[in-house]
């Protein structure tokens, strides 16, 4: 395989990715990168592809932006002649390797590739070495309300909590529950419990022909509750203790637990 050589090109000949994987850059990280480039230059060449008389960035969009800010006239690049499919995959793989990946920008990029027919869900998952569920979740993120996307980008809320609360059937209730999670915090398990509880109330209102109103919706709970399989008592998870129980008949154990979707885990 031919060795890829680094060469210096005029920065004005290098354009941003179309579309970019990252929509926004962290201001503090960008300031540090600009300072580093002014002092040390660009240490890692940008990966680009030829576009007529110019070059389009495949990997290195942030470095290109910082180089403009630093007043650099020439930048080191490695040129690879990739088609659109190869370019999109290379960009995604490079983005996944970073520790500060913005899940929303990443999700919008994935959703755009699928919507435009560049890849289907299974094909994109295979190319990225990810599961189909991972790609499907990115499509969900791309369609989330803006307030959820902003919280994800700012790392104010975990992805798991967002995915659970996003499944609430009423938009106004979803907004209220998410605001509560931002104020007081919420675990994924609590978000799942709240989602199930509130959707049951919303569906009951829809079935009766009544409009959804706040008084009929339970208040959000930061700690989930579970029904005891033996006493039918509703207990907070924090009031429960994990114990080991010897089980001979696994099917009887599954029936006794009576918790939908829960799997019984046993040890010899």
Image (tube, rainbow, N blue to C red):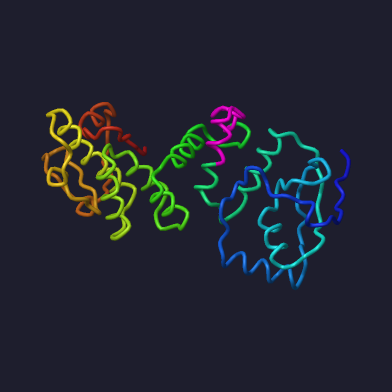
| Residue 115 included in the magenta stretch of the image | yes
**Screen quadrant of the N terminus:** top right
Residue 42 position (above or below residue 148): below
Residue 129 position (above or below residue 104): above
Task: Provide the residue span drawn in magenta.
Answer: 109-125
- Camera-nearest residue between 123 and 249: 123
Residue 101 in the image: state x and y as whole percent.
Answer: 56, 52
Instruction: Using the rendered view, name the quadrant where residue 169 is placed.
Output: top left
**Screen quadrant of the C terminus:** top left
Give left or right: position of 4 versus 247: right
Q: Main secondary structure of the magenta part?
A: helix
Q: At x 42% / y 48%, what residue is drawn?
A: 159
Residue 197 in the image: state x and y as whole percent.
Answer: 21, 41
How many marks overall?
A: 0
Residue 109 in the image: state x and y as whole percent.
Answer: 56, 41
Q: At x 20% / y 32%, what residue is drawn?
A: 203
| Residue 76 included in the magenta stretch of the image | no
Give left or right: position of 106 versus 91: left
- Camera-nearest residue between 212 and 178: 212
Residue 78 in the image: state x and y as whole percent.
Answer: 81, 49
Instruction: Using the rendered view, name the quadrant where residue 69 is placed.
Output: bottom right
Q: At x 70% / y 58%, what residue is drawn?
A: 63
Residue 163 position (above or below residue 147): above
- Camera-nearest residue between 89 and 11: 11
Residue 30 position (above or below residue 219): below
- Camera-nearest residue between 132 and 82: 82
Give left or right: position of 154 versus 118: left
Give left or right: position of 76 versus 254: right
Q: At x 62% / y 46%, what residue is drawn?
A: 20
């Amino acid at each position: 395989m031919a060795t890829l050589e680094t060469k210096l090109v005029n920065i004005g000949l290098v354009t941003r990715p179309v579309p970019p994987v990252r929509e926004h850059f962290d201001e503090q990280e960008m300031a540090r990168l600009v300072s580093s480039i002014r002092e040390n230059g660009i240490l890692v060449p940008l990966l680009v592809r030829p576009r007529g008389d110019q070059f389009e960035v495949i990997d290195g969009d942030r470095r290109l932006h910082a180089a403009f800010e630093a007043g650099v006239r020439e930048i080191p690049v490695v040129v690879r002649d990739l088609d659109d499919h190869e370019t999109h995959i290379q960009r995604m793989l490079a983005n996944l390797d970073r520790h500060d990946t913005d899940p929303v920008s990443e999700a919008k990029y994935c959703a755009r590739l699928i919507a435009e027919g560049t890849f289907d869900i299974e094909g994109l998952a295979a190319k990225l070495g990810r599961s189909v569920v991972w790609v499907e979740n990115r499509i969900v993120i791309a369609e989330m309300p803006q307030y959820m996307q902003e919280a994800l980008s700012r790392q104010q809320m975990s992805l798991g909590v967002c995915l659970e609360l996003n499944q609430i059937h009423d938009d106004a209730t979803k907004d209220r529950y998410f605001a509560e999670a931002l104020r007081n915090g919420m675990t994924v398990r609590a978000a799942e419990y709240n989602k199930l509880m509130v959707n049951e109330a919303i569906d009951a209102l829809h079935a009766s022909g009544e409009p959804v109103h706040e008084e009929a919706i339970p208040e959000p709970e930061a700690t989930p509750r579970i029904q005891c399989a033996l006493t039918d008592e509703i207990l907070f998870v924090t009031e429960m203790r994990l114990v080991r129980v010897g089980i001979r008949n696994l099917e009887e154990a599954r029936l006794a637990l009576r918790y939908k979707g829960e799997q019984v885990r046993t040890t010899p």
